[in-house]
Amino acid sequence: MNLVLAPWLEVVLRALAVLVAFLVLPLLVGQTEHKVMAHMQGRLGPMYAGGFHGWAQLVADGVKFVQKEDITPARADRQVFRLAPFVALIPYLVALAVIPLSPKVVGATVDASVVLVLAVIGVGIIGTLMAGWASANKYSLLGAMRAAAQLVSYELPMVLAVASVALAAGTLSLVGIGNAWNPWWLLWQLPGAVVFLVSALAELQRPPFDMPLADSEIVFGAFTEYTGLRFAFFLLAEYAGIVVMSLLFAVLFLGGWHGPFEPWVGWVWTLLKGFLVAVVVIWLRVSWPRMREDQLQRLAWVWLVPMALFQLAITAVGVVVFPR
Amino acid sequence: MSETTTPATPTTPTASSRERALTVGVGAGGLATADMVLNIGPQHPATHGVLRLRIVVDGERIVSAEPVIGYMHRGAEKLFEVRDYRQIIVLANRHDWLSAFSNELGVVLGVEQMLGMEVPERAVWARTALAELNRVLNHLMFLGSYPLELGAITPVFHAFREREELQAVMEEVSGGRMHYMFNRVGGLKEDLPAGWMGRVDKAIANVRKRLPSLERLIVGNEILEARTRGVGVLPLETVRAYGVSGPIARASGLDVDLRRDAPYLAYGELFGDKGPGRVVTRSAGDCLARLEVLLEQVHVSLDLAQACLDRLVQLPQGPINVKLPKVLKVPEGQIYCATENPLGFNGYYLVSRGEKTPWRLKLRSASFNNVSVLSEMLPGQLIADMVAILGSMFFVVGDVDK
């Protein structure tokens, strides 16, 4: 494992590896969603594309999206409209680059990686806002307004929940937090984990918090006017978001690479745990209807924020009483 | 939010921003807001077809709402006038495509009454059974589609599995899955196939067995309850004023059901002292109450269909229809024949001048009245709640536009 590479080659290889992960993992989650959701609903899901149980369905979807006409509405704010999908997508790529699968398997080592990830993820929402405003469509505008309202409710509890973990580990580095994790955290950090999962769902705009999209109300909100590849980028951003959030949850609360067998298979454990979280995210979509925007805000301020503060308090007590 | 607390009149942007409890802004004044006109439909996923709502919104709050109808107007009443009574049945079962059997029923009952025709007893019980199965099919459709509008994507699959079970027996008997065309003046088209009643028994048992899992997904869900309880309250006075009928009216506490109050077919006995029939009512009048009425009516209708089958088995063999003359002419006169359709009162006002076609056949459909109440209900609501309310009005656009 002690292969020494030229610095430039190493950078290129790492960047490529992150890019490949960024393109493959969301498709994997997407296909899992197709199949898991279908079986939960007594259906089969895709069965034909690619031959074996429709494994190539999302590839086929991608090919379809590429072929579609790229339409920019006449009255749209052209520049902003065309830029928005990338603003939504790129932050997750950056976030994925610093999330470690194990202390060795990580795109880029950054000291305060937790802060970087949280900051970068917060940028993604601007893509939705840009799309909603620039589309010159009333439904899109309503969707963007809802996304902005949603932003207010999940950011604070999420940051508080992460702060609690960072406090417990005594570091702001994801690798450091992962290394400091021990099974007691499952109990100790439980309220924080719940808060993080709920606010991650809200950040991802996944059911039950998909009000900014709400196909039956505002016809996919900010994405209404998008077609072809740009629309596909928004979809990819959603699934890349699930990957990032699931891995983040796995590293922060489930101990990432901690598991039986040799230490060097740690990255498999992180991926497996992240995959499990992704399945939970899918499961929630199957079983729950959509909340209303004001109900989410009520949930956030009446439950999530106090819970996160409570978590922060017990973490502080824990750190003081049982110093490491 | 009730009417008494919100002034529903549209105001100027500055005035409406002053009404708010919370104003956002810097310095002395808040941010001025402007009203926006939003067309929901005619192509919109929440309108089940081509209903159009022209709403004025302030942010997400609806200031005024106006249902615009007629995109699916097919001139059904005029078409009735140039068809004979056999052909009318084909047309009449299409306006509310989820209640085809019940629609047919109103026409043939009216014609039979004007002819003074005696319908064989087996036909009466078979019609009642089929009408109730049709009601279950209709209700299951809405029990699937309503959660879908609230963002729950799974119940529709459960609902359709049960629908499929019942569709199979309906298809076996009539040949149709949607537009059954099984009623004839004087009875039914054909006798029931051998062994059919046993299969219906089994289908009903299967639906009964699996219904609880659907119910848990719908009324057992906290979010769904939060989205529907206290939302879109329809007061009893408004129900009366607009002629709202069916499950929606009963959810607001109007205890009326033509099956009990003006019995036709075999309902007199079924809703009698020892019969299984009962009228489901609620008093809250909100979206949840409407949904609950629908759910409970499914159970009642399954009981009724079962009772009809039990009776059919005991009845002696005999004809299931009456032989009609080559040219069926209805004697001069007029009649109003109303039935309790799954969505509410469905009435045909038939005027005959002794011809083989009606001189006039007026159609009173349930959804038309039920939808017209929307302009009273929507102002003051959020767009998200608008979808919840719209879905809970259980309408079929074909039944509105005719």
Image (cartoon, coloured by chain):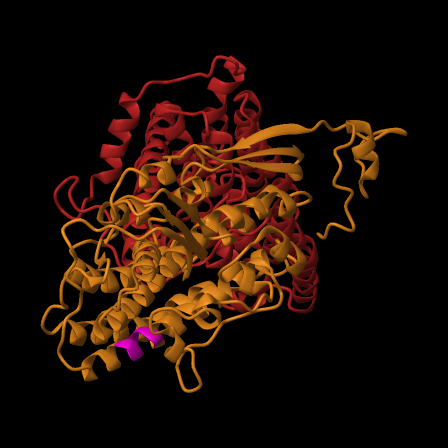
Q: Quadrant location of residue A193?
A: bottom right
Q: Quadrant location of residue B31?
A: top right
Q: In the picture shown, does residue B363 fall above or below A304?
A: above
Residue sitting nearer the eye, A17 or B341: B341
Q: Dividing the image into 4 quarters, which one contains the N terminus of chain A? A: top left
Question: Most prominent secondary structure in the magenta stretch?
Answer: helix
Region rendered in magenta: B304-308
Q: Is residue A69 left or right of residue A76?
A: left
Residue sitting nearer the eye, A168 or B240: B240
Q: Where is residue B138 in the image (x, y as percent from the top left)?
A: 36, 58
Q: In the picture shown, does residue A114 fall above or below B106?
A: above
- Residue A247 visible in image: yes
- Residue B151 visible in image: no
Q: Does the magenta stretch include residue A112?
A: no
Residue sitting nearer the eye, B259 or B120: B120
Tint applied to chain A in the drawing = red
